Image: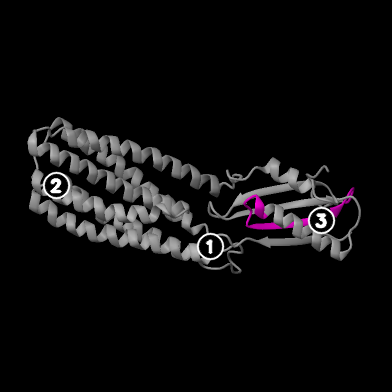
């Protein structure tokens, strides 16, 4: 019996989502760059070394966001002769880049915090208060918009914006306290706590990114359940050589060999393939490649033992 191939394509995360992700990262870039300019002016006004340092830190982050934005834009390109599955994984490069920036930045901030604990500095608390309120509102807006996205790249950028939000909440708390009590050590202590939270989430995001790059089975798919549902279909005796992976953490791919008890005519093959594609889609698979073969037929795979 001749081998038959079937391809199923899911459209649950189509071009609309891709453009939304690119738009969300673009918003984060412009918010970050604009606020870095405000921080620079505010740091000079309040004579706060912490705010000036964060301003230069944000200018560097703007560069990383620009790279992530560009890579997310590239990921929207359709498949071609060079990338047969498309450019989806380019968004993962953006996630890796910005996660690395967050990692290095958090370590640098913790180092600076230790220095400030040993040598406390007194900034302009009133000026810090107004800048903190503005910082929370602006960065909070960008973080909320990114929170709605589901891509790994968006989550990485959202972590960056949340780092800024939490940082400005810390500045807000410190500035309010400093209006009444002189406790300069509070600022670096809160910053260390925020950096630990960021590092933990960077670890989680990097872990998810590398799982996709190493073609780990998507965590939202139960391979045993999928196999059981396909085997339960009429005409299906067994399946083998089942492979599951993800393009970018959202779009899941599958290939599998399906063994039937007897040869099927063309109409029966089409019907069975459609049923298998439906089962795959129900289990979160956007693209399924199915090969049909009969019991005892040599499928051409040397490792196959069905």
Dot 2 crowding, Cα within 10 Å, few <14, some 14–19, many 20+: many
Q: Nearer the viewer, residue 156 or 17?
A: 17
Dot 3 crowding, Cα within 10 Å, few <14, some 14–19, many 20+: many
Where residue 190 sits in the image (x, y, percent)? Answer: 24, 36
Looking at the image, is 30 positioned above or below residue 226?
A: below
Which label is found at residue 87? 1
- Check disc 2 and report its element: helix, strand or loop: helix
- Check disc 1 and report its element: helix, strand or loop: loop
- Image quarter hosting the C terminus: top right
Part of the protein shown in magenta: 281-297
Q: Is residue 32 left or right of residue 53?
A: right
Q: Earlier in the sequence, mark 1 or mark 2?
A: 1
Mark nearest the camera among 1 and 2 is 2
Quadrant of residue 85 within the rendered picture = bottom right
- Check disc 3 and report its element: helix, strand or loop: strand
Q: Earlier in the sequence, mark 2 or mark 3?
A: 2
Q: Is residue 75 visible?
A: no
Separation of residues labelled 3 and 1 (CA atoms): 29 Å
Dot 1 crowding, Cα within 10 Å, few <14, some 14–19, many 20+: many
Where residue 28 sits in the image (x, y, percent)? Answer: 33, 58
- Image quarter hosting the N terminus: bottom right
Residue bearing mark 3: 292
Quadrant of residue 224 within the rendered picture = top right
Residue bearing mark 2: 129
Residue at 78 percent across and 56 percent down: it is 291
């Amino acid at each position: 019996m001749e081998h038959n191939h079937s391809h199923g394509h899911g459209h649950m995360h189509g071009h609309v989502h891709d453009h939304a992700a690119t738009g969300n990262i673009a918003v984060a870039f412009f918010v970050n760059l604009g606020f870095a300019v405000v921080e620079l002016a505010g740091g000079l006004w309040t004579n706060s070394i912490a705010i000036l340092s964060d301003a230069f830190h944000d200018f560097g982050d703007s560069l990383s966001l620009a790279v992530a934005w560009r890579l997310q834009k590239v990921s929207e390109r359709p498949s071609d002769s060079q990338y047969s599955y498309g450019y989806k994984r380019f968004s993962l490069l953006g996630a890796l880049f910005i996660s690395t920036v967050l990692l290095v930045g958090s370590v640098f901030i913790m180092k600076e915090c230790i220095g400030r604990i040993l040598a406390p500095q007194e900034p302009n608390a009133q000026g810090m208060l107004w800048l903190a309120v503005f910082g929370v509102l602006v960065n909070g807006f960008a973080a909320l918009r990114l929170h709605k996205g589901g891509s790994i790249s968006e989550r990485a950028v959202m972590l960056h914006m949340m780092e800024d939000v939490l940082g400005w909440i810390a500045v807000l708390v410190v500035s309010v306290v400093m209006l009444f009590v002189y406790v300069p050590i509070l600022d670096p202590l809160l910053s260390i706590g925020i950096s630990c939270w960021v590092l933990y989430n960077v670890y989680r995001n990097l872990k998810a990114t590398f799982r996709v790059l190493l073609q780990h089975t998507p965590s939202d798919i139960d391979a045993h359940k999928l196999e059981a549902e396909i085997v339960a279909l009429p005409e299906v005796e067994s399946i083998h050589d089942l492979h599951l992976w993800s393009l970018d953490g959202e779009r899941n791919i599958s290939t599998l060999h399906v063994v039937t008890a007897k040869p099927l005519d063309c109409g029966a093959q089409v019907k069975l393939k459609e049923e298998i594609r439906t089962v795959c889609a129900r289990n979160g698979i956007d693209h399924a490649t199915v090969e049909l073969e009969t019991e005892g037929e040599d499928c051409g795979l040397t490792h196959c033992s069905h």
